[in-house]
Image (tube, rainbow, N blue to C red):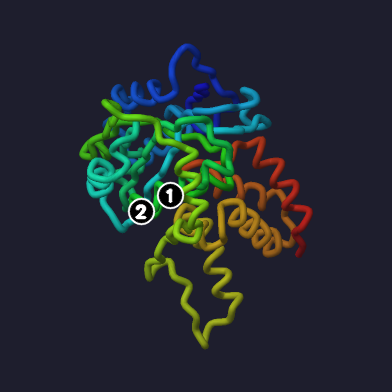
């Protein structure tokens, strides 16, 4: 099934009926949403309010806050790493093992604005894949492409939305790829078997910290100063720093606890900071879901 919404902050999915999941993805890639001649700041607003997003798979409701995605029919891989350019990753797809499978690849809204390949790859799956199978297939595919990709949507946020292709002035130089002629769906069971035979091989690549990001030790700087630096960095640029915490949720609760402690228990201010940091990300947690998480996290904080 196809579940769409406009902007990441929308509360309900719209169900699209009468169309094959992968055919829908091909159509949105061939005829992208237009968002040209917008500044970087206006594109950020567009992403949150007007950009098209989709979930392909099995969902137990249309209210995004309390529905669960139980299986996916399209595998998405978001390639953000700096070890390869957009065109280099595109060439790896067309020249490698994956070229036999039905897939698309296109630049994200961040392409041309942020560093890295900034590419989203969508691959048709032979059957709906529940979370345990999906992450195995995801890791094998990322290994085959030799890229650093964002694992969040395959692990901590299985219900994460995928943005479909939006053509911008900034990303217009990166040509999309539609690989749908004489191809087949990626065989989920075969890829799960490949993973199970050697799981250690497919451990995700870790993003390499730049000198700007790296928290270096110093005999002259106490541990609390390094911790404060990390927290402030996460508030300013959460997309680059959440992996330092082991995940997006861990970062939010870590930052929240730090703000709560250093504002003498100001819960409202802490909530405002968490909401700001979350919405700065490429795929923020829905407000209703974040509210539930915040209430749970706050019970563990102290000052």
Residue corresponding to mark 1? 140
Sequence-first disc among 2 and 1: 1
Q: What is the number of the mark on residue 192?
A: none
Residue 278 location (% of width, % of height): 56, 46
Res 171 → quadrant? top left
Q: In this image, 234 relative to 287: left or right?
A: left
Q: Number of labelled discs? A: 2
Q: In this image, 11 relative to 114: left or right?
A: right
Residue 216 location (% of width, % of height): 46, 77
Answer yes or no: is residue 45 visible: no
Q: Which residue shows up at 43% across the image and 66% down it?
A: 213
For numbered disc 2, what is the local secondary structure?
A: loop
For numbered disc 1, what is the local secondary structure?
A: helix
Residue corresponding to mark 2? 147
Answer yes or no: is residue 51 visible: yes
Residue 243 location (% of width, % of height): 51, 59
Question: Is residue 191 or residue 14 the one in the foreground?
Answer: 191
Q: Which residue shows up at 43% across the image and 39% down it?
A: 76
- Residue farthest toward the top in the current orientation of the protein: 18
Instruction: Report crowding for label 2: few under 14, some 14 to 19, many 20 or more residues within 10 A (C-alpha).
Output: many
Alpha-carbon distance for marks 2 and 1? 11 Å
Name the mark nearer the viewer: 2 or 1: 1
Q: Which residue shows up at 50% across the image and 45% down it?
A: 192
Instruction: Locate the C terminus by quadrant.
Output: bottom right
Question: Is residue 39 or residue 283 the one in the foreground?
Answer: 283
Q: Which residue shows up at 58% across the image and 44% down it?
A: 132
Residue 26 location (% of width, % of height): 34, 25
Q: Are marks 2 and 1 in contact (CB under 8 Å)?
A: no
Instruction: Report crowding for label 1: few under 14, some 14 to 19, many 20 or more residues within 10 A (C-alpha).
Output: many
Question: Is residue 276 or residue 132 the one in the foreground?
Answer: 132
Res 35 → quadrant? top left
Whether 178 is drawn above or below 2: the answer is below
């Amino acid at each position: 099934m196809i579940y769409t919404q406009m902007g990441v902050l929308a509360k309900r999915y719209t169900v699209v009926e009468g169309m094959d999941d992968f055919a829908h993805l091909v159509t949105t890639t061939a005829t992208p949403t237009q968002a040209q001649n917008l500044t970087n700041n206006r594109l950020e607003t567009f992403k949150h309010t007007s950009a098209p997003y989709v979930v392909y798979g099995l969902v137990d409701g249309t209210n995004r806050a309390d529905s669960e995605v139980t299986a996916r029919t399209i595998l998405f891989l978001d390639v953000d790493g700096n070890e390869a350019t957009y065109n280099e990753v595109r060439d790896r797809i067309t020249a490698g093992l994956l070229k036999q499978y039905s897939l698309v690849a296109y630049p994200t809204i961040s392409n041309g604005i942020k560093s890295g390949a900034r590419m989203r790859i969508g691959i048709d799956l032979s059957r709906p894949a529940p979370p345990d199978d999906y992450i195995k297939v995801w890791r094998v595919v990322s290994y085959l492409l030799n890229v650093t990709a964002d694992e969040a949507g395959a692990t901590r946020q299985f219900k994460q939305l995928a943005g479909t292709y939006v053509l911008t002035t900034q990303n217009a130089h990166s040509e999309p790829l539609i690989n749908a002629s004489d191809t087949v769906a990626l065989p989920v069971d075969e890829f799960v078997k490949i993973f199970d035979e050697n799981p250690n091989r497919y451990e995700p690549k870790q993003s390499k910290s730049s000198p700007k990001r790296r928290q270096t030790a110093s005999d002259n700087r106490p541990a609390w100063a390094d911790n404060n630096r990390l927290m402030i960095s996460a508030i300013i640029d959460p997309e680059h720093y959440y992996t330092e915490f082991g995940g997006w949720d861990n970062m939010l609760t870590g930052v929240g606890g730090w703000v709560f402690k250093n504002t003498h228990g100001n819960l409202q201010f802490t909530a405002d900071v968490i909401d700001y940091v979350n919405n700065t990300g490429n795929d923020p947690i829905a407000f209703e879901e974040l509210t539930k998480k915040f209430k749970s996290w706050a019970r563990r904080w102290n000052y």
